[in-house]
Image (cartoon, rainbow, N blue to C red):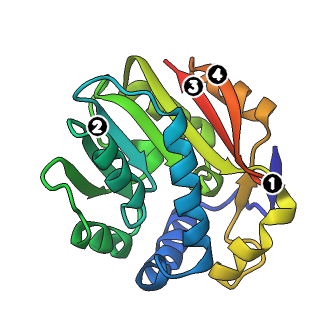
Amino acid sequence: MVFIETNNEMTNDFVSNKQRLFDRWAPSYDCLFPSVIYQAIHQRLLKYVNLPPKARVLDMGCGTGRLLNRLASQFPNLHGTGLDLSSEMLRFARSSNCHHPRLIYLRGEADTLPFAENQFDAVFSTISFLHYLHPEHVLNQVARVLKPHGSFYLVDINCPQFLEPYLQVFQTTSAEAIRLYSRESRQQLGANAQLKCLGHHSLLTPVLLTVFSK
């Protein structure tokens, strides 16, 4: 696990700073170079996604909703919920929602998911896990809201040398405490939350998919 300029005292200020960063990013999010990379990641991720009929899924850190729109197109009976900290990101997600009412978007935090136990067949986190101050809390929440045998698809950067273009979007050298996780640290975090690691898959050179099952 790699930590980049983290601060153990970040609490409410940490969340507020993240929200402001993503609110500022929202208007240009789908036009910037990182978004092109995200679309390639989503396309490759879908090759590994296995969902039951009429699946209910959660996308944590959904941004402008691109992944959920792709999932809803590929799985016509899917019902999805997008969760994001940024009200501006959610505004753009709702405006481009091609699958209403099968897709809805809510504001919330990943370490206090506003959902009942055993609610989702799958949870997705795509280039958002690196932002969480308390990853162990997030995984406990994921395990709580997943149905038995549900899947958690964790997609994130795992190579520090590929972070610079991403950090430039935030106009900062630290992006307010970004954390990267190796295969081993992902497996350990998952095991602590009673999630079984089913395997790792490279989607792009710096981007790793880890699949968990409850």
Q: Residue furthest top?
A: 148
> Which is in the foreground here, disc 2 or disc 3?
3
Q: Which comes sooner in the sequence, label 2 or label 4?
A: 2
Residue with the mark numbered 1: 3
Residue with the mark numbered 2: 115
On screen, 190 above or below 80? Answer: above
Residue with the mark numbered 4: 197
**At numbered mark 4, what does the secondary structure look like: helix, strand or loop?**
strand
Query: What separation in Å lies between label 1 and label 3 (alpha carbons)?
Result: 23 Å
Query: What separation in Å lies between label 2 and label 4 (alpha carbons)?
Result: 23 Å
Q: Residues within 10 Å of mark 3 (few under 14, many from 20)?
A: many
Identified at 27% across, 44% down, the residue is 80
**At numbered mark 3, what does the secondary structure look like: helix, strand or loop?**
strand
> Which is in the foreground here, disc 2 or disc 4?
4
**At numbered mark 2, what does the secondary structure look like: helix, strand or loop?**
loop
Residue with the mark numbered 3: 212
Picture quarter with the N terminus: top right
Q: Residue type at mark 3?
A: Phe
Q: Which comes sooner in the sequence, label 2 or label 3?
A: 2
Q: Which comes sooner in the sequence, label 1 or label 4?
A: 1
Callout 4–callout 3 Cβ contact below 8 Å: yes
On screen, 127 above or below 114? Answer: below
Identified at 47% across, 42% down, the residue is 124
Q: Which comes sooner in the sequence, label 1 or label 2?
A: 1
Q: Position of residue 181 (x, y in %)?
A: 75, 44
Query: What separation in Å lies between label 1 and label 2 (alpha carbons)?
Result: 29 Å
Q: Residue type at mark 4?
A: Cys
Nearest the eye: 16 or 143: 143
Q: Residue type at mark 2?
A: Phe
Q: Residues within 10 Å of mark 4 (few under 14, many from 20)?
A: many
Nearest the eye: 134 or 80: 80
